[in-house]
Image (spheres, rainbow, N blue to C red):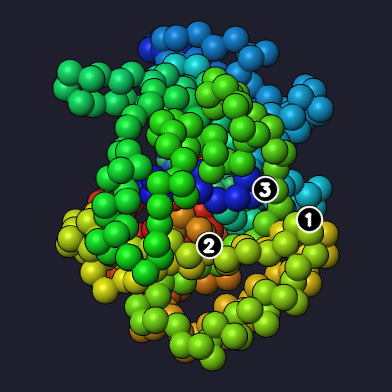
Amino acid sequence: MVESSQHNLPARMRVSKSLPMISYILVLALYFSFYTITPISSHSLQDGFIKCLHKNTYVDFPLDKTFFTPERNASTFIEVIESTAQNSRFLTKSLPKPSFIFKPIHESHVQASIICSKKLRIHLRVRSGGHDFEGVSYVSQIETSFLLLDLSKLRKIKVNIEDNSAWVQAGATLGELYYRGQFLGGKGTLIEVMNKGFPELGLTLKDCTEMSWIETILFNGEFPTNTPIKALLQVKSPFGKPSFKSKSDIVKEPIPVLGLKGIFKRMLQDQEQPASFLAWTPYGGAMAKVPESKIPFPHRNGTIFKILYNTDTEKKPTRHINWIRDLYSFMTPYVSSNPRQSYVNYRDLDLGKNTKNTKANYEKAQIWGTKYFKDNFERLVRIKSKVDPGNIFRHEQSIPTFPV
Ligand SMILES: Cc1cc2nc3c(=O)[nH]c(=O)nc-3n(C[C@H](O)[C@H](O)[C@H](O)COP(=O)(O)OP(=O)(O)OC[C@H]3O[C@@H](n4cnc5c(N)ncnc54)[C@H](O)[C@@H]3O)c2cc1C
């Protein structure tokens, strides 16, 4: 669930082989020794995982291109972790790293990884673009031994103009997808709309720059003028990786002058470069016409706009994090309440965290779950309990299962 304005944020944020009995016994032995007697080395765990993969896929995977461990090559291992980790706040040495990384090159490798992580009881984190605001796709703070399934090599895009469909593999970047282009409207139409809705702004043709939709992606991404659109195909952003902490709010009533003054005062307190910022995204319109229960995203009718609070944490992280928490607390009377709502794509672990895989997570998750999903949270828990009763896919804010 990604709103179309992904790049409107400032750039600075910016195999089936038969199973020989002998190895089956070996896997069982590994499993029991790891979980009930003494921990086995990460080396045997990796070997066990590779063997298990071989048994569950018919497509070969050259280990040097798909499997990364600190023991084999520490610098390549770190390079792979960092390659698509988009928030460098989660790249500090003290944060737990995966025991190993597997990069599938075929869909069947994904299935095999899930089967094997379940069999060998290795916690699994899945990473597509690595943009999670709280890094949950590549850092596990609740379970320290885990494997990273990095989907960056599965990046095919198939656009079918005839049936108006697009198939996008999980590892593709938005740049690669957007490269396939589009058209939204000309400046004449915009002037008409603006003169009707906001004549007081006095917008004229001179104020507008007409460009193709794909060019707006470069423009909003703050690429220099005349950058060729092929730049969007670069998998690596030319702007480096920000280190940041964000929070969000949903606003239902206009913010009074007193509130605005309080915001400005606090903004001026945190203007070291790169400065903190707020992004206000207007809601309503077509979004408000969709019933809240249609899809998990519930912020529909009655929402005026969404606030993204963002602070840079590269330097003095504690100070900046305290600052953003103080601003969030100040905003309480001016934003949605009961529950105070948030946007799941701007994940915020201050709202609460699951602990290690336990049924007791349900109660805690209700707090942040209803902020992100309102009444849809209960339905999501129902679905989760049905399709993933063992809670294989979990992280600090994943949907929990119902307690038994
Ligand atoms: C610089 C920046 C700008 C952003 N701008 C916007 C914006 O304008 N609007 C907006 O709405 N959001 C924005 N986001 C947030 C972003 O859209 C969300 O974090 C989104 O979830 C990122 O998807 P990803 O695949 O890159 O994330 P990842 O970090 O790879 O994954 C996110 C979560 O999904 C899980 N996951 C990943 N792949 C799969 C899969 N194939 N199957 C099942 N689970 C999977 C992961 O385990 C993790 O829990 C921005 C983020 C960044 C860092």
**Residue pointed to by mark 3:** 12
Look at the numbered disc 1 and say if its residue's Cβ is closer than 8 Å to ligand 1: no
Q: Residues within 10 Å of mark 3 (few under 14, many from 20)?
A: some
Q: Which amino acid is tagged 1?
A: Glu
Q: State the residue at coordinates (40%, 65%).
A: 201
State left or right for residue 388 relative to residue 7. Answer: left
Compare residues 402 and 344 and report the one nearer the observer. Answer: 344
Residue 292 vertical placement versus 295 (above, below)? below
In the image, which is nearer the foreground, mark 2 or mark 1?
Answer: 2
Which label's residue is closer to the chain start, 2 or 3? Answer: 3
Which label's residue is closer to the chain start, 1 or 3? Answer: 3
State how far apart marks 2 and 3 are (Cα). Answer: 13 Å
- Label 3 element class: loop
Kindly check if marks 1 and 3 are in contact, taking CB atoms under 8 A apart as contact: no
Labelled disc at residue 209: none
Q: Which amino acid is tagged 3?
A: Arg
The answer to whether one can see residue 107 in this image is no
**Residue pointed to by mark 2:** 279
